[in-house]
Image (cartoon, helix red, strand yellow):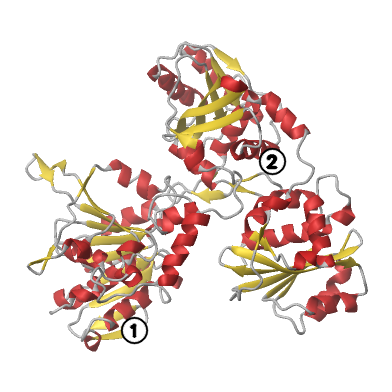
Amino acid sequence: MIIERELFSPNAFWVWRYTLDPSVRNIVLMGGSSSSKSYSVAQFLSILTYWEGTNQLVMRKVGASIEKTIYTDFKTAINGIEGLAEHCRFKQNSIMFDNGAKIDFTGLDDSEKIKGISQYKRVFLDELSEYEESDLKQIRLRLRGMEGQQILAAFNPISEEHWIKKKWFDLEEWHEVPMELTIGGEKLPPELCRVKAVLMNSPKMILNHRTGEFEEHAPDTVIIHSTYLNNFWVVGSPDGKYGYYDYQAIANFERDRINDPDYFQVYALGEWGHIRTGAEFFPSFNRGVVCGKFPFNPELPIHIGMDSNVLPYVTATFFQKEYKPDDVQQVTQFDELPIESPNNSARKAAKVIAAKLREYNYTGKVYLHGDASGKAANTIDENNRSFFDLVIDELEHEGFEVEDCIGNKNPAVATTGEFINAVWDGRVPGVAIRIDNDCTTSIDDYQAVQKDENGAIAKQKVTNPVTKQKYEAHGHVSDTLRYAVHDLLRAQYTEFSMGRKRSIYSEGEFKFFNPATEYDYEQAIVYVLPSFGGRFALARLARIADRWHLTDVRLRPVKGNDEMAGWIRSFTATMYVVECQQAYFPMVRDLRKDLPQVNVLKLGSDHRVRISAMSDWVRAHVHLDPEKMSEPEYAAFMGDVLDYNEQSPAEQMAASAVLSGLARIIIRGV
């Protein structure tokens, strides 16, 4: 076959190199979006299928997503390779070549395809981060019986706690591969094969069961790490003669770099990180500001924050408090222990903690902070001692003096969260909270944990695919931070909780959009409270990327149903949401006759909690129209929003309640 190299971006050349190396079992393409990971695999696997006459299997976690994603990539890739499409037929979930070879497409939910996986030369796992670790283990076990079989995978790195990193990449030793390639007997110019990095694992000594001798197993896994800068159909070819320079894509990445660095880190730079949703419990946690190298100080006592949940681990976090010049009190988390099975019981966890204390040669008093519910009697223990009774007993048995700092009642979740955010925002003078870079499980939790409608931590349950046990994936580490900070900074916390600012917003926290610019809005939502504190309130938000423009509002005395329905009909939207008492349901039914997607919600019972919980999202995402701020109704609406606090009467809550309702709808997904 004669293949023009102008077809390819660098990823495809590296796929070419390693798919032809039978010693390489795993080829992983990791990186940002628009880096041509999946498309490069589609190009060269299609060529190999015809050239070798071998079968390939392409998988996604859920089969329903295949047709509009990876199948389209393969079809486009084949049609872009001159002459190749003439030798194949495109069928549903399959591409058949006239030499008898084929590429099948399936989801992991098709168990029959998994059982017959040994007939394929290669398996490509698209969006690997969506798979469970057990999925990959099963595929590895079943892909056997043919020389040179390979597993290819592509994904965007997300959480540093993801099993791909913790249970695979971190367990290997890696070395960089020189950025040079020889393809078809020709050494490629460096600029044609340059990606962010190519890593290969180190050789291992394994037992040969036939000879009984240990022998060296050659490196068998390669990681190809790339970004959008390595895609010639985003930045153009190095010589400017082929490819495409996508000005809009470049501008979007640059916008993310400035406005959303977490998103930019994952989807542009292809680095491990977290994507913000707008509903974070710690929206003010900025890893670049809060984290650093903060080692244990042997001159300071150790405080341990502890959570009594045993799944996915017993949590122990290590803190120290230091008084700095100018009366600054600095709390530093310098270590962590996510204590997993088989040590995730009170006594065994205490032994692990004791071992860690001995690593630091620590002989001072240990101050224990934690969940008050962990002091309840434990029926498993023959003496009915609590979880923390057992922890303290075991630590004392290990030779440590322990001071029990656990209160009889837990501090308010929402308020402690607000306090920590305020510290990280610099709004609490004389206080600092720092996290050591090596506390990766903690950092992951602080970035990932979400806020529920009441402003507390949303502890969503997940199911272990192997044990089928249900547990809360995030929030336990964040709880230990809250307990420790509450106790170590009690005076500042009390002052903060008693003297919170007059309003939950300030004027400078809202951004404005340019009404003179033409916007191609992706959707618009109208949210209505027909009767709230004696007033009719309506707001229309229109979306552009992750921003929402507050284009129109209504804030008027309650009128008859027909008149209020007319106000609603005066605004176009893709969705209408009416939150109301049952008496207004007939009005909603009438609106459904001529408006698209009209939804009705029963009037909520505690709007103050919802307003507080959604305020961070509203600050970050809602942009105002500066020209309409001079209009009486728009100005009155925003005046009520800016003046709202927890003591505001019901008639001054309507505007804030409408915005919080919109925020809740959007965060849940519309």
Question: Dot 2: what SS?
Answer: helix
Q: Give the residue type at disc 1.
A: Lys
Q: Is residue 410 above or below residue 569?
A: above
Using the image as rendered, state which of residue 73 and residue 291 is in the foreground.
291
Mark 1 and mark 2: Cα distance apart in space: 54 Å
Residue sitting at x 81%, y 50% = 644
Using a 10 Å C-alpha cutoff, classify the residue at mark 1 as few (fewer than 14 neighbours), some (14 to 19) or many (20 or more): few
Q: Is residue 129 left or right of residue 562?
A: left
Using the image as rendered, state which of residue 75 and residue 443 is in the foreground.
443
Q: Quadrant of the N terminus?
A: bottom left
Using a 10 Å C-alpha cutoff, classify the residue at mark 2 as few (fewer than 14 neighbours), some (14 to 19) or many (20 or more): some
Question: Dot 1: what SS?
Answer: strand
What x and y, as percent, mark residue 516?
65, 73
Which dot, 1 or 2, sits closer to the camera?
2
Q: Give the residue type at disc 2.
A: Ala
- Residue that carries the numbered disc 2 in the rendered image: 414
Whether residue 209 is visible, yes or no, is no
What x and y, as percent, mark residue 108?
39, 64
Q: Is residue 464 above or below residue 580?
A: above
Q: Which mark is residue 91?
A: 1
Going from N to C along the chain, the mark reached first, 1 or 2, is 1
Query: Quadrant of the rendered structure where residue 605 is?
Result: bottom right
What x and y, as percent, mark residue 545?
56, 66
Residue sitting at x 41%, y 76% = 67
Q: Is residue 461 left or right of residue 467?
A: right
Query: Quadrant of the rendered structure where residue 3 is?
Result: bottom left
Query: Quadrant of the rendered structure where residue 663 is?
Result: bottom right
Residue sitting at x 83%, y 61% = 636
What x and y, as percent, mark residue 289?
50, 39
Using the image as rendered, state which of residue 24 and residue 33 is in the foreground.
33
Residue sitting at x 54%, y 41% = 446
